[in-house]
Image: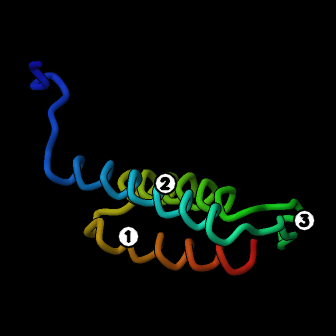
């Protein structure tokens, strides 16, 4: 199978591997330690999976905005995403 058209790079592969690992970990956590939804500052009931989705969606917007508006290294955006993820899992 020729996958040259996909232009796989090491960062792209790492990104998809991390997402796959997160899904596996959250599936395991959901089976091993079931949880009841909780209400946070958004006043909607969320589970771990919901908060993961909100975090990934927000991180995508943070990184896209960083690329569009900043000339600084992308590592700074990664740090902001980590802070954002911690806040989402704590308060949402």
User: Do residues under tags 1 and 3 come within 8 Å of each other at their CB atoms?
Assistant: no
* Apparent side of residue 59 relative to residue 10 in the rendered image (left or right): right
Instruction: State the residue position of label 3.
Output: 43
First in sequence: mark 2 vs mark 3: 2
State the SS at label 2: helix
* Apparent side of residue 52 relative to residue 24 in the rendered image (left or right): right
* Apparent side of residue 24 relative to residue 11 in the rendered image (left or right): right
- Residues 35 and 48: in front is 35
State the SS at label 1: helix
Q: Position of residue 62 (x, y in %)?
A: 49, 59
What is the CA distance from the residue labelled 2 to the residue labelled 3?
Answer: 25 Å
Closer to viewer: mark 1 or mark 3: 3
Give the residue at x 20% y 54%: 11
Which numbered disc covers residue 37? none
Closer to viewer: mark 2 or mark 1: 2
The quarter of the displayed image where residue 53 is located: bottom right
Instruction: State the residue position of label 1.
Output: 78
First in sequence: mark 2 vs mark 1: 2
- Residues 58 and 14: in front is 14
What is the CA distance from the residue labelled 1 to the residue labelled 3?
Answer: 27 Å
Closer to viewer: mark 2 or mark 3: 2
Which numbered disc covers residue 23? 2
Q: Quadrant of the N terminus?
A: top left
Q: Which residue appears farthest toward the top when viewing the image?
A: 1
């Amino acid at each position: 199978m020729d996958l040259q058209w996909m232009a796989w790079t090491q960062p792209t592969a790492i990104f998809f591997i991390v997402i796959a690992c997160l899904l596996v970990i959250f599936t395991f956590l959901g089976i091993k330690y079931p949880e009841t939804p909780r209400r946070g500052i958004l006043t909607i009931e969320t589970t771990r999976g919901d908060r993961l989705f909100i975090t990934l969606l927000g991180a995508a917007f943070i990184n896209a905005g960083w690329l569009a508006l900043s000339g600084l290294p992308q590592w700074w955006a990664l740090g902001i995403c980590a802070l954002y993820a911690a806040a989402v899992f704590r308060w949402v």
